[in-house]
Image: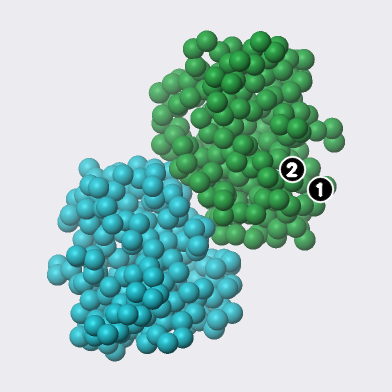
Chain colours: A green, B cyan
Amino acid sequence: MPSLEVCFSPHLLALHTLSHKAVVAVDILRATSCMVTAIACGVEKILPLQDTEICKAMKAQGYLIAAERDGKQIEGFDLGNSPFSYMNLAGKKIAFTTTNGTQVIKLSENAEKIIIGAFLNLTAVADYLAKEQKDVLIACAGWKGQVNVEDTLFAGALVAKLVQKGFVIANDSALLAKSLYETHKNHLLDFVNLCSHVQRLKNLGIQKDIEFCLQKDVYAVVPVLEDGEIIRYEL
Amino acid sequence: MPSLEVCFSPHLLALHTLSHKAVVAVDILRATSCMVTAIACGVEKILPLQDTEICKAMKAQGYLIAAERDGKQIEGFDLGNSPFSYMNLAGKKIAFTTTNGTQVIKLSENAEKIIIGAFLNLTAVADYLAKEQKDVLIACAGWKGQVNVEDTLFAGALVAKLVQKGFVIANDSALLAKSLYETHKNHLLDFVNLCSHVQRLKNLGIQKDIEFCLQKDVYAVVPVLEDGEIIRYEL
């Protein structure tokens, strides 16, 4: 059966062999939640970028440009990092750079597949992975390299689903994430509200975003990276 | 009140400022459990080293030499990594190198204080830190950079004790570790036995060591690093 690993931080990704794996990129608050929302709501494609200047330059090529640093939209960009901003952009192309989420996608580029995971598309991601039957690495973006609660809980939720589908836990981080999810699954918001990153985001007035991003299975889509851009996988 | 952080892997240590902190070095299976046992049983001092050749050369200076790699004692050394080997060495000096534990001590050398933590001296460590009133970082050795279950559970046990003494949780890893410990505190051995590192160690026939290392408060000592060597802190 395929194996299942979790990586809690981009700084630990180099410890994993990616070449034969499906990597699930995770940044629950809020990059991958935005990407799932955008693709589910009809955005044609998303170009993930690390550099804000390169991102800005994509405007000339017909992209909407989206940039977040430290939880805030950067001035001069069309979009920030709230999922509610990505619900009415059907047919558009978006160039997107964020503090953590787009970095973890870049660092995973040696993987055989890269898909975008969030609570919003949890079951769709699990179904996709069960169909592919590749070894899986769930790559948490964290917050500036540090482990965070919300990405860890999502990793645990996905591990719990995949174990039921026969995947075999292959590192301790997967075991720890699953246990944490099972402890807190009926009160995710309460637990996430304790955490440092959320305290920071709350100061930015995004409690509504946080509540939205912790909802499971709002969308039945799987965004996948193809030739450097994120598109909708047709199940 | 002093702050409390956990670091799950030596690869994440660079994200933390250490200069004003007390760092608790943790490698439950088995380096720090051995060090606590040795110091409790009267060993005069322990010299932690990264390099096996440098360690070997200390023999000429009257040290017993101890070396473990991949869970096994290296040939030509006096001691390996079983706590039972460290119970009858009163008055001796030991030069010690291990896969993970001695590395995390080396990486923490900018800290204001470095102390050695294990389940075996949990309460003594908590009491020492409460007396010192410095900001605390619990630095888990992990397994070759990867997060492991047993170090995370110990970190959670220490966080739980220090929160009761008024310390303030300052990163998500501390929150996650505390939750994991509280979920599993009444069946630590069962949970640790699930993990990958332990499966590896079991193949080496050290189940007795694992059971010993998960016992709380066997020894009321705090080993501290002074001038590069680990000695007994006199409370």
Q: Which x, y percent locates residue A9?
A: 52, 45
Q: Are marks 2 and 1 in contact (CB under 8 Å)?
A: yes
Q: Which x, y percent locates residue A228?
A: 71, 31
Mark 2, residue position:
A113
Using the image, determine if residue A28 lies above or below residue B134: above
Quick one: label 1, few (<14), some, or many (20+) residues within 10 Å?
A: few
Let me know if residue B169 appears in the view.
no
Distance from disc 2 to disc 1, alpha carbons, whole Å, reads: 10 Å
Which part of the image, by quadrant, shows the C terminus of chain B? Answer: bottom left
Query: Label 2's element?
Result: strand
Direction from residue B113 to residue B146 in the image, left or right: right
Question: The numbered mark 1 sits on a residue in which chain?
Answer: A
Quick one: label 2, few (<14), some, or many (20+) residues within 10 Å?
A: many
Instruction: Please state which amino acid type lies under the numbered disc 2.
Output: Lys
Which one is in front, A103 or B168? Answer: A103
**Residue drawn at x 45%, y 52% as measured from the top left:** B11
Q: Which mark is residue A132?
A: 1
Query: Label 1's element?
Result: helix
Question: The numbered mark 2 sits on a residue in which chain?
Answer: A
